[in-house]
Image (cartoon, grey):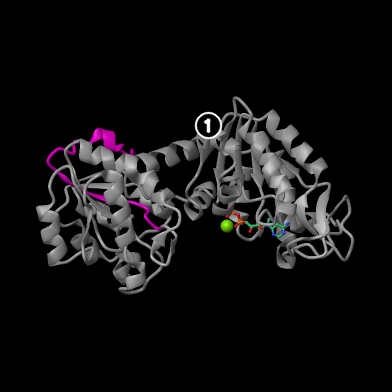
Amino acid sequence: MAIRSIKELAFNGKKALVRCDFNVPLEAGKITDPNRIEASLDTIRYVLAQGGAAVLCSHLGRPRERTPDLSLKPVAEYLSNALGHKVNLAPDCIGDITGRMIADLALGRALLLENLRFHPEEEANDRDFAHELARGKQIYVNDAFGTAHRAHVSTAGVARFIAERAAGFLMLRELEALRALTENPAHPYVAILGGAKVSDKIGVIRNLLTKVDAILIGGAMAYTFLRAQNETVGKSRVEEDKIDLAHDLLAEAAKRGVAIVLPTDHVVAEAPAPGPTVAIVRHIPADRMGLDIGPETVAAFVARIRDARTVVWNGPLGLFETPEFAHGTLAVGEALANLDGVMSVIGGGDTAAAVAGHPWAARFSHISTGGGATLEYLEGIELPGVKALEV
Ligand code: ADP
Ligand code: MG
């Protein structure tokens, strides 16, 4: 089954429902990071330039009912500036007043619907609500990759009530990069996994074991694996109830010939507090915790990725929020970004945040905006928001 690009559809004279991810951080009613809005502008501008009218919709936060603080009003203002015409905010995403605003919307113009999650039917994927949301639109465009793992009305249910459907540019970029990891990836293919918990990433590890040549494990999750190998890890974060699972995963990797590379040295401190006294050790003393990979491990990881042709990275390699424990993440990140001839894909909200703002981060092949959607994709789970676009 295929997914169409918006370039394959004719927008002229039509009204398109465009599902965007405008779930931006707000402080006192002001947008503190407009990245997600910026990321959808290509798609919106394309629909308008082709002579279509764009009916934009998104969720914001997790309201269960109408919540004035979670109005999309600041987004409408941002869009008005970005698009150069007044983007009105409809008082709701469905209903008579909104219906009239959609009917009156001129071609080449955008209208923003109010927060979809003011209606609990949105997350319940309610059929009648889907029918209402579809009213008056001839094309459905989904550009909200970040919510593609949710089977909600605006991401899935609405599609079948609208005549034509297609993926927006952001969605297409995400799918292209992620497909390069699952459909015929160039080998050697190396995964770098880190982050807080093994339990968050079990599905990802299992699926990657069937695809990659090596998995490099850092972050807090490494200590559960080290414990499975009877290493002493002091006070490091260990999921006691996942030690057996880690043991099984190591055995599974050995059986499949997938190399698992664990840290051999660590940056340790007494506690994850700011301004810590740190040391670099091979064996973690009983009263210390491992909070970053050490320089020998960084070198071993870099040596592995230097020979790779495909690298996927999810999960920071240390407690990067504290500068003393950010070095491993940044050193491996910079080395990966600067490699030529490697398809490098970064996934995971915290991983993306860890590399954001560093000049070399622009050199990765792709930094996924997906968070949970990217992780589910890497687990091999079919995303409902992608499935709904199939024609
Ligand atoms: P992502 O969002 O990229 O999928 P995760 O949410 O799995 O990543 O993990 C990110 C968190 O893991 C960060 O808050 C980071 O501080 C934490 N972390 C990484 N290494 C360690 C460690 N050694 N000890 C404690 N926390 C760690
Ligand atoms: Mg996270």
Residue 3: image quadrant is: top left
Name which residue lies at 36% across and 70% down: 69
Please name the amino acid that badge 1 sits on.
Asn
Residue 311: image quadrant is: top right
Give 124 or 278, whichever is nearer the viewer: 278
Residue 4, x across and y down, in percent: 30, 38
Decide if residue 391 is in sight here.
no
Magenta range: 1-23
Is 217 included in the stretch rendered in magenta? Answer: no
Residue 89, x across and y down, in percent: 23, 60
The C terminus sits in image quarter? top left
Name which residue lies at 89% across and 54% down: 283
Residue at the limit of the structure toward the top, as seen here: 341
Q: Which residue is mark 1?
A: 184
Name which residue lies at 72% across and 65% down: 239
Residue 298, x across and y down, in percent: 76, 41
Give 286 or 207, whichever is nearer the viewer: 286
Measured along the vertical axis of the image, is residue 297 above or below residue 149? above
Measured along the vertical axis of the image, is residue 292 above or below residue 71? above
Q: In the displayed structure, does residue 117 sit left or right of residue 381?
A: left
The N terminus sits in image quarter? top left
Name which residue lies at 76% across and 43% down: 261
Element at label 1: loop
Decide if residue 24 is in sight here.
yes
Q: Residues within 10 Å of mark 1 (few under 14, many from 20)?
A: few
Give 381 or 224, whichever is nearer the viewer: 224
Q: In the displayed structure, does residue 32 sit left or right of residue 355?
A: left
Residue 6, x across and y down, in percent: 28, 38
> Which quadrant does ligand 2 occupy?
bottom right
Specify the principal SS of the magenta part.
loop
Q: In the displayed structure, does residue 61 sit left or right of residue 281?
A: left
Is 17 included in the stretch rendered in magenta? Answer: yes
